[in-house]
Amino acid sequence: MKKTAISILALVTLASVSSLPASAENDFGGMAKSTAMFPVRTAALGAGLVVGTPVAILRRVSNRCTEYTGNFADKIGGKDNLPPVLFASILGVPFGLVSGTAEGVYFGGKNAISNCVEHPFSKDSFSLGDELE
């Protein structure tokens, strides 16, 4: 009974495969490559989230702290002088920390997710590329 069931199942499978049209969409090589790359892409996503998010946070915080401090210093005397920069950093650093952390979390996750398929383990997936966004 088992041999008959297995034979019928194999015959049905063979018949269904042979009736499929040959096209580029049914390319076994592309499907095999995509299947083999799944663990790599998954690992790239995890590594991008674990490593890339703190990198993006650090980059965004440093940019935002500098930007806010410079803007506040321009309002009270100019960013070329030390006293206005020191007083402006009292507000510029906390604002930069808050906004930079939020942006870094967003852009770190976005870079990891968007680059894990096409370019796994690339600079952009770890938020180390020229463009942070």
Image (spheres, grey):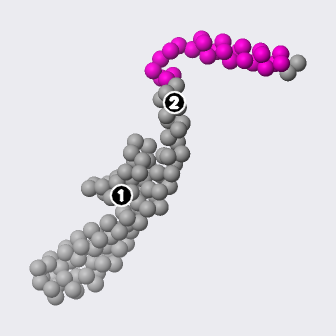
Point out the image quarter for the C terminus. bottom left
Q: Is residue 18 left or right of residue 76?
A: right
Q: Residue furthest bottom?
A: 83
- The Cα–Cα distance between marks 2 and 1, rounded to whole angstroms, is 29 Å
User: For mark 1, what is the residue?
Assistant: 127
Q: Residue at x 21, y 86 (%)?
A: 86
Q: Nearer the viewer, residue 34 or 25?
A: 34
Can residue 33 be seen? yes
User: For mark 2, what is the residue?
Assistant: 31
- Which SS does the magenta portion mostly show? helix
Q: Mark 1 belongs to which amino acid?
A: Ser
Point out the image quarter for the N terminus. top right
Q: Residues within 10 Å of mark 2 (few under 14, many from 20)?
A: few
Q: Residue at x 37, y 72 (%)?
A: 98
User: In the rendered view, would you say 127 is above or below 34?
Assistant: below
Among the 4 quarters of the image, the one containing residue 70: bottom left
Q: Nearer the viewer, residue 59 or 23?
A: 23
2 vs 1, front mark: 2
Q: Residue at x 30, y 55 (%)?
A: 129
Q: Is residue 124 left or right of residue 82?
A: right
User: In the rendered view, would you say 49 is above or below 59?
Assistant: above
Q: Which structural element holds mark 2?
A: helix
- Residue 34 lies, in percent from the top left, at 50, 35
Residue bounds of the magenta highlight = 3-27
Q: Residue at x 49, y 27 (%)?
A: 29
Marks counted in the figure total: 2
